[in-house]
Amino acid sequence: GINAEYMGFGPDVQWIDNEDYSVDPNAAASFYSAIRAWYPFLTDESLLPGYSGIRAKIAPPTVGFTDFVIQGPAQHGVPGLVNLFGIESPGLTSSLAIAEVVQRMLVPR
């Protein structure tokens, strides 16, 4: 078998007004019940804070779901530049289709 000394859970999302990379160790409490659905033997106080980052969003939380945005030279006028904004988890599933869109923008047929 394989023994893993570290497993990562998350991420969670916290909307912020100012740049802040600190991790609140008390946030772990909200993870326990969700993790125990898959790993029921998780003991109390066994979670440790990980890392934080700031994810670019294209819409505020009040708007709800907003798909990603792809802008090529036709939208912004800069030859050879393609902007990919707001690509989150569904972007991984869509990555090949996104690549085809980018290729069509950059390589005329």
Image (cartoon, rainbow, N blue to C red):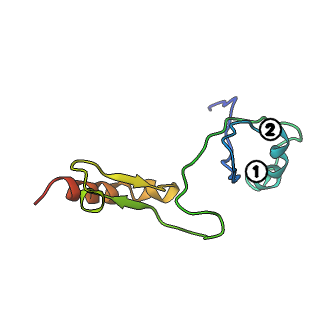
- Residue under the point 39% across and 53% down: 84
The amino acid at mark 2 is: Leu
The amino acid at mark 1 is: Ile
x, y percent for residue 79: 21, 50
Q: Against 64, is 30 above or below?
A: above
Quickly name the residue at label 1: 35
x, y percent for residue 67: 48, 66
Residue count near mark 2 (Cα–Cα under 10 Å), binned few <14, some 14–19, many ≥20:
some
- Secondary structure beneath disc 1? helix
Give yes or no for contact between labels 1 and 2 (Cβ–Cβ under 8 Å): yes
Residue at the extreme left: 109
Report the quarter where the C terminus lies: bottom left
x, y percent for residue 28: 81, 44
Residue nearest the observer in this picture, 72 or 77: 77
Report the quarter where the N terminus lies: top right
- Residue under the point 65% across and 64% down: 61
- Residue under the point 27% across and 55% down: 102
Quickly name the residue at label 2: 47
Q: Quadrant of residue 22?
A: top right
Q: Which of marks 1 and 2 is in front?
A: 2
Instruction: Kindly report the distance in space between the C-alpha atoms of the residues bearing marks 1 and 2.
Output: 10 Å
- Secondary structure beneath disc 2? loop
Residue count near mark 1 (Cα–Cα under 10 Å), binned few <14, some 14–19, many ≥20:
some
The answer to whether residue 11 is left or right of residue 77 is right
Residue 84 got which mark?
none
Residue nearest the observer in this picture, 58 or 67: 58
The answer to whether residue 98 is left or right of residue 38 is left
Please tell me which of labels 1 and 2 falls first in the chain: 1
x, y percent for residue 68: 45, 61
Labels in figure, total:
2
Residue at the extreme right: 44
